[in-house]
Amino acid sequence: MSVSPAVSVSLSVSVSVSTIVRASFTLFFEDNRFDTSLGTFASSPYRESQCHARASLREPRRAWPSAWHKAFAGTGVKQTYPTPPRSYLLSLELVRSLVPAIKLIARHDGSLAKQLTRALSSVPLNVAEAGGRVGGDRTHLLRIAYGSLREVNACLDTACAFGWLDALPVPTLRDELGALLYSSAR
C-alpha cells in the first residue's frame, strides 16, 4: 500500500511538469511573435527601423534568386542574394562551354574526363563559398579555385597533347577567369 501513493504522486508530478513546459513553450512563442506560417520569429519595429536606417547608407541589394527559392515558390518565403561576382559568372560560363570537350575526352580516357569534371566543378563552388567568407578564409578558398582552374588547364593541355582535342577550348575565357581569381586571391 505504501508503494502505490508514491507512484501516483510521481505520475501527477510528471503530468504537471509537462503541462507547465507546454504552457511556457506556448507563452514563449506568443510573446516573441513566432510566425507559424513561415517558421520564423517576426522582427521588432525597433530592429526594422535600424535595418532601414542602415540600408539607406549602403548600395541597394540586387535580387538573385537561388535554386532554393523555386522550391518554396508561393509559400511567402522570399530568398534572394546579392548579385554574384564576375568570377562566379565566368566560372559557370566556363563549365557550360567545356561540356562538349569533356564528352570528347571521355571517349578516350574516362579517368581524365572525371578529373577534369571534378576540377572544373570545384572552381564555381569555391568561388561561391568564398563569397560568404571574410579575411584569410576567403583568400584561401579563392586560391583553391585558382588552383582548380590551373588543373583544368593542365587536363585540357594533356588532352591536346594526346591529340584528342584539335585546339584548347575557350582560351580567352580561361585566361580572364584566371586573371580575376589570381588578383582576388592575393
Image (cartoon, helix red, strand yellow):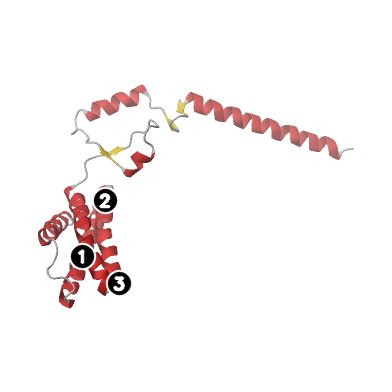
N-terminal label among 2 and 3: 3
Q: Horizontal placement of 82 versus 25: left or right?
A: left
Task: Count residues near mark 3 (Cα–Cα under 10 Å), then give few for <14, some for 14-19, many for 20+.
Answer: some
Which amino acid type corresponds to the residue marked 1 in the rendered image? Ala
Please state the horizontal and vertical placement of residue 145, each as a whole percent of the image. Answer: 23, 59
**Residue annotated with mark 3:** 110
**Which residue is disc 2 drawn over?**
128
Q: Name the element at disc 3.
A: helix
Looking at marks 1 and 2 on the same chain, the residue that comes earlier in the sequence is marked by: 1
Circle 1 crowding by C-alpha within 10 Å: few under 14, some 14–19, many from 20: some
| Labels 1 and 2 touching (C-beta < 8 A) | no
Is residue 75 depicted above or below 143 in this figure? above
Tell me if residue 128 comes above or below residue 17 in the rendering. below
Image location (x, y in percent) of residue 41 = 43, 30
Give the alpha-carbon distance from disc 1 to disc 3, as whole Å: 12 Å
Q: Which of the numbered marks, if any, corresponds to residue 176?
A: none
Q: Position of residue 69 (x, y in %)?
A: 34, 39
Write down the residue under mark 1.
101
Query: Residue at position x 19%, y 53% from top?
Result: 93
Residue at the location (29% across, 26% down)? 50
Q: Nearer the viewer, mark 2 or mark 3?
A: 3
Measure the C-alpha gap from mark 2 to mark 3.
28 Å
Q: Position of residue 1 (x, y in %)?
A: 89, 37
Q: Is disc 2 surrounded by few (<14), some (14 to 19) or many (20+) residues within 10 Å?
A: some
Element marked by disc 1:
helix
The answer to which of 9 and 144 lies nearer the viewer is 144
Q: Amino acid at mark 2?
A: Ala
SS for dot 2: helix
